[in-house]
Structure formats: C-alpha cells, structure tokens
Image (tube, coloured by chain):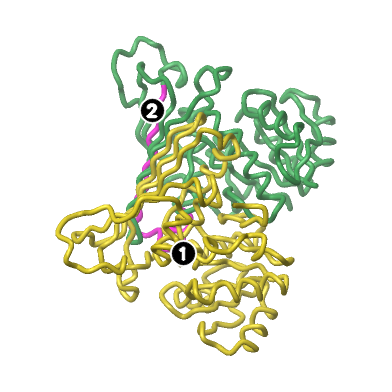
Chain colours: A yellow, B green
Amino acid sequence: MTAVTVVGTGAIGGAVATALRAGDVPGCTLAVALNSSAPREQVVAAVTAADVVVEATTTAVAGDLIRTAVSAGTDIVVCSCGVLADRSPAELCAGPGRILLPSGAIGGLDVLAAAARAGRIGATVTHTTVKCPSALGLPELIGAQVEVFRGSAREAARRYPRTSNASIALAFATVGLDRLEVVVVADPAATSTTHRVRWVSSVGDYQFDFRNAVDETSGGRTSLITAWSVLEMLAGLHRGFGPGVLVESGAA
Amino acid sequence: MTAVTVVGTGAIGGAVATALRAGDVPGCTLAVALNSSAPREQVVAAVTAADVVVEATTTAVAGDLIRTAVSAGTDIVVCSCGVLADRSPAELCAGPGRILLPSGAIGGLDVLAAAARAGRIGATVTHTTVKCPSALGLPELIGAQVEVFRGSAREAARRYPRTSNASIALAFATVGLDRLEVVVVADPAATSTTHRVRWVSSVGDYQFDFRNAVDETSGGRTSLITAWSVLEMLAGLHRGFGPGVLVESGAA
C-alpha cells in the first residue's frame, strides 16, 4: 500500500482525504490529514511517515512543505503550483524526493508532453481561463467579458496565484514557464470555469476546451475535477504509471 | 536502464526503434528490434530479454505477442489495440506482465480517467475520427464528407481495426468498449487526420480537437504523434509515472 499524507483541509485536500479514507483509490491509504497551520514537528512526522505527500495548502506555505518532503525523500504532489514561479526548480528539487504536479483543472498533458518531446522549436501553446470576477479576486462591477491578463505562465502565477495552477503544470509538461502564454478573462456571466488550451507545432494542432463544475465551498475558485486529478495521480504512482508532471531540477 | 524490445518495423515501430537507438528517451535503451514475421523462438528470446515490449505489428499477430510477453512477466505496450475488441482481457491478462495502451493519435486520457473515477454513471463519451477514404480502405470515389460508421468502440475496432486504436485506449481509460460511441467520417478533402473527443458528466464538459500530421510512409493511416506517445510512455514507465492506460483483467 502507498501511504499518503494530505496537508490542507480546503476543497481539494478535504476531497482527497475523504476519498482515501473511504478506500476509493486502489493501493493507496490515508496516513495523516493535517491542517496547513499544523505545528512544524507534526508536519515533519507526517511527511516522514508517508510514501507520498499531497500539498493542498497555499503558495505561502507550500515552499516549506516541498523542501521538507524533498529532503526527507518523500514524493510530493503539489497543488499550489504557483510557488514554482518564484523559486528555481534547482532550489526546490535539492533532495531525493520528487516534485509532481497534477493536471488539475485541465488535461491533455499526455499528448502535449509527447508533442513537446517530438519538438519544442516553433511550438506555440496558449492557455486561456475564463472565470467569474470574484474567483479572480475582482469586483463584480465588470459588466461584460474582459481580458484581465495576457503574459507568460510565470507572470500569471505572480498575478493570479490561486488560478494559475493548471498553467504551471502545463508549462512544466511542455515549453516552460516563460514560453507558455496565459490569458485570463473575467466574465460576470460565468457560472462555471472554462479553460481552453491550444497547441500548434509540426506534429499537430490541438485545441482542448474544458468546462468544469466548481466546488461550491471554494467561492467558484476550485473545479471538482482537480481533486480527482490528484486521486488519479496517486493511483498511478502506486501502479508505476499514470498522469502527472515531474518538476526536474534543470527545468526553467 | 529500461531495456525495450520493439516488434514491428512499420511507421510506428521504426520511429520508436530509431529514437531509442539514438538515446532520445532518458532511461530507456533498445534491446532488440524485430520484424513482425520473425521466427517464434527469436521473438520469445527478445521478449524475455526486455523489461518492456512495444507491439507495433497488426491485430492479426498482436494476440500471440501479448500472450508471450504477459506470460513471461514482461510489460507490453500495445499499438494494435483492436486485438482487444475480440478477446477478453481476462484471457489476455493471464500472467504477471501487464498490457498497457498508449494514447496514440489522441490525448486527454489523463483528465478523462480522472473524470471517469469521479463518476461513470450518466457520463457520455464520443470519439469522432475524420480520415481520407484511402486511409479507411474505401474507394476515392466518395465526393463529399460522409459518415461511414457510428457505433460502439468494440464494433468500430471490428470494422476499422487499423483506425480504431485510439478509440480502444480511450474506452479502457473511461467507460469501456461497449459504452464509448465511435463515429468514423470519410472526407476526400482531408489532408490530415482529425479526431474529436467529447465527454459530458457531472464534473465537466470537455471537447478535444486533434489535427495530426500524418506519416507519409503510412498511406495516411498513421499520425506522427503516435510514435511519440509510445516514447513518452516508455519514459514514464522508467521514472514510475507517465501516460498510458492499463488493461485490467476485469475490464469489459
């Protein structure tokens, strides 16, 4: 059995811990579920006791947790991917544990990683997210759909850390944080979160559209599919293959 | 290092063997590359010598190769997925080796496997493929785009074994061979192969469009991305996670 420690008790952490406790993921069992404000010695003990840690906290505390897991040799599935925009992978990856990212609110990282392996030169990738203004921390005063950001995945993560997790995973799977173009659109009429991923290179032209049901407890910020992407990843880690993106120390 | 034996020297097998020989896949090395008509004792020796076998032959010979690998305890990546439409997984999976399917000409099996884990009840999945008539074994006489097939993935694999590999992988990743709806369209104007995958369930509504460049040596049948999906899968098997679909003995 793969013993999993979950840190964070919000929408994603709560759903992951509940599914593990119920035995919904073959081969995986819940070791410990902790609040993100748990005392450091408790976190260290829980990380050491686990085969895999799921980080479902915030970018503010994720960095410390990643370093604790990586140096203890425990793999960590990072949901607050924004933390990777401001720290070098080489700094965070300094240890035997691995940093793994779920596909989160999007998908298709399987074929896009293959397309990137076929050739990154000349490839273009764009990730467009449409959310209601409140989910982006914006006032509801906006009357119509408006593009509030266009730039690199790294800059998107700095400006919208809570909404850029899927962009970061997509970037690490393909062309890196500085080459992935991210567009963020605020739409007052949005009742669900939508994502569009577009890839163009010599092997193919791909467009993926995602309309996700949102977790009502998250203020419209978190898609229900995100917790399931973590669970699917945990099942894969147990069987030796499955979805997910590896953050390598040499990555940009 | 993960030693890989490749059986089949067509468009996919040739490209996979070439990339492995060139050292393009970290952690993986080419053990043996064989023609699909190689003598049985040679095949058995090559399968036994490998950690993973890549089957890139035809549905006519894939069944024997799968049984040889599975009973020898060697994992096998199956490209001629159509063979799974007429044999029960329980029969083919009778051994310690595992049967693994690449996403092939499509992708998004990461998020769709997660969505299926969230709930298959009420979920609908459709895979539409548009190819030129010759790639479907049809005369070029067709004047306009025409739907030549609509039915289950199992039936599609029986009717169009060479063009249904991605449907089979998608089915095993999600709702099974009898519930995945497949549509095949012949289009005399098609210069590339296109696929559309549509998923609707309570967690999300997803539409993925793929326009693939084709391998000119394959008569328009094989997308270039397919060999890369196999290579990405081999890299993943080496590191302990990566794309791919497991065929389980209890699957339908």
x and y percentages locating residue B213 in the rendered image: 49, 26
- The reply to whether the magenta stretch includes residue B65 is no
Q: How many marks?
A: 2
- Classify mark 1: helix, strand or loop: helix
Judge from the rendering whether residue A33 lies leftward or rightward of residue B118; answer left or right: right
Mark 1 chain: A
Which span of residues is magenta-colored?
B112-131
Q: Residue at x 40, y 58 (%)?
A: B120
How far apart are the alpha carbons under marks 2 and 1? 31 Å
Q: Chain of mark 2?
A: B
Q: Residues within 10 Å of mark 2 (few under 14, many from 20)?
A: many
Say which element carries label 2. Answer: strand
Q: Residues within 10 Å of mark 1 (few under 14, many from 20)?
A: many
Query: Mark 2 highlights which residue?
Result: B130
Of residue A115 and residue B216, the one placed in the foreground of this image is A115
Q: Which residue is mark 1?
A: A228
As shown in the figure, which amino acid type bears the numbered disc 1?
Trp
Q: Quadrant of residue A156?
A: bottom left
Whether residue A179 can be seen here: yes
The amino acid on which the numbered mark 2 sits, given as a three-letter code, is Val
Looking at the image, which residue is at 57% across and 72% down? A63
Q: Residue at x 55, y 29 (%)?
A: B224
Against A144, residue B9 (above or below) is above
| Front residue of this view, candidates B216 and A179 | A179
Location of residue A245 by image quarter: bottom right
Q: State the image coordinates of residue B226 (x, y, percent, origin top left).
A: 56, 34
Q: Residue A1: in sight, yes or no?
A: no
